[in-house]
Image (spheres, rainbow, N blue to C red):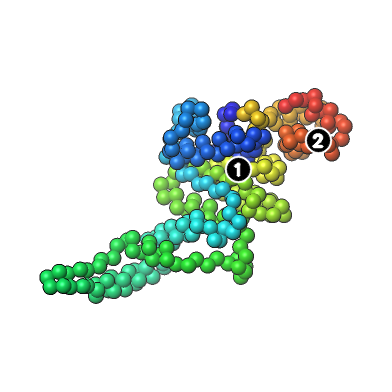
């Protein structure tokens, strides 16, 4: 694949014609951030503006593969919420006060437990792990607008924001979201997109839906061809500008729409003039 030019704290979207490239990309980028061994032919390197490689450990990597049917029952959801509660036990004054009272009761409880057998004495001492195990034993109940049905995209937004709050070392964030369209019906796509964009962190969305692609800035859309190159949307916009009188906003939106239609070969509903234009541009 050609290089991806990623803008810090902006929303990006990528799609693939090749299932093989998509699989390799997803696997390689995860390997990079999780510091797994990568083969010579499938790798990802992130470089700064000076061309120096940035170590995956220097990022706070948040990855969501939106494949869960019911996110409220997903094990990963429970893990994030448990970590959040554990964090608040130390940093939230109100919860900390409740925790101190609970800890005193646990200490009192364990102090009164001992087993003896002659000169043999067995005592039980509480540890920090005791509290985490207690947290893991809690059953987590989640409701939305007093209803048991919780839209995945609503809960996922909360989980993403929670993980961002747990970025204790204040590292640069890289958020990878795979197929967010799985979390929402078509009517909610725009809401999901706006939620992701409002996070103001470096975000890369892997998607096959036009709505998630064209909401990115034209330079942040990667329509990946089978050979690993990207459809040249900026060139298409310049050609549109040369042939048609459109204001800048309309020009950009028209270019993104046409680029996606040309990329997916979905040009049947276009008028003859636009079809001829795309055929002549060969972006």
Query: Residue at coordinates 53% horizontally, 44% vertically from top-left?
Result: 175
Q: Can you say whether 252 is above or below 121 in the image? A: above
Q: Which residue is mark 2?
A: 267
Q: Can you say whether 189 is above or below 229 in the image? A: below
Query: Residue at coordinates 41% horizontally, 47% vertically from top-left?
Result: 169
Residue 96 seen anywhere in this rendered image of the structure = no
Whole-percent x, y for residue 255 in the image: 74, 34
Query: Relative to the observer, which residue lies in front, 204 or 216?
Result: 204
Query: Residue at coordinates 44% horizontally, 49% vertically from top-left?
Result: 167
CB contact under 8 Å: marks 1 and 2: no
Query: Relative to the observer, which residue lies in front, 256 or 152?
Result: 152
Q: Residues within 10 Å of mark 1 (few under 14, many from 20)?
A: many
Horizontal relation, residue 254 to residue 90: left or right: right
Whole-percent x, y for residue 59 in the image: 46, 41
- Toward the right, the furthest residue is 272
Considering the numbered disc 1 on the image, is that residue within a helix, a strand or a loop? Answer: strand
Q: How many marks?
A: 2
Residue 76 seen anywhere in this rendered image of the structure = yes
- Toward the left, the furthest residue is 119
Instruction: Looking at the image, tell me whether mark 1 or mark 2 is earlier in sequence order.
Output: 1
Considering the numbered disc 2 on the image, is that residue within a helix, a strand or a loop? Answer: loop
Separation of marks 1 and 2 at Cα, in angstroms: 25 Å
If the image is split into quadrants, where does the N terminus sit? top right
If the image is split into quadrants, where does the C terminus sit? top right
Whole-percent x, y for residue 66 in the image: 59, 50
Q: Which residue is mark 1?
A: 205
Horizontal relation, residue 100 to residue 33: left or right: left
Q: Residues within 10 Å of mark 2 (few under 14, many from 20)?
A: some
Q: Quadrant of residue 112?
A: bottom left
Whole-percent x, y for residue 275 in the image: 83, 31
Query: Relative to the observer, which residue lies in front, 254 or 277?
Result: 277
């Amino acid at each position: 694949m050609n290089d991806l030019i990623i803008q810090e704290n902006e929303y990006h979207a990528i799609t693939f014609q090749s299932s093989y490239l998509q699989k390799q990309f997803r696997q390689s980028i995860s390997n990079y951030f999780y510091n797994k061994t990568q083969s010579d032919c499938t790798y990802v390197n992130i470089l700064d503006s000076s061309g120096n490689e940035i170590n995956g450990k220097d990022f706070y990597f948040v990855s969501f593969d939106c494949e869960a049917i019911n996110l409220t029952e997903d094990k990963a959801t429970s893990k994030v919420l448990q970590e959040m509660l554990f964090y608040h036990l130390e940093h939230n004054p109100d919860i900390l006060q409740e925790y101190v009272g609970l800890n005193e009761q646990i200490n009192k409880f364990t102090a009164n437990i001992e087993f003896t057998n002659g000169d043999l004495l067995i005592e039980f001492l509480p540890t920090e792990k005791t509290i985490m195990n207690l947290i893991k034993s809690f059953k987590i109940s989640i409701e939305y607008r007093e209803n048991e049905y919780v839209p995945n995209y609503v809960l996922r937004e909360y989980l993403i924001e929670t993980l961002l709050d747990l970025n204790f070392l204040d590292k640069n964030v890289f958020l990878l979201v795979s197929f967010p369209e799985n979390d929402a019906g078509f009517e909610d796509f725009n809401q999901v997109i706006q939620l992701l964009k409002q996070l103001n962190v470096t975000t890369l969305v892997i998607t096959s839906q036009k709505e998630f692609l064209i909401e990115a800035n034209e330079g942040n859309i990667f329509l990946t061809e089978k050979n690993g190159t990207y459809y040249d949307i900026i060139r298409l916009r310049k050609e549109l500008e040369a042939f048609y009188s459109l204001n800048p906003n309309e020009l950009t939106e028209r270019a993104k729409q046409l680029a996606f239609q040309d990329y997916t070969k979905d040009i049947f509903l276009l008028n003859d003039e636009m079809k001829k234009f795309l055929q002549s541009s060969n972006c």
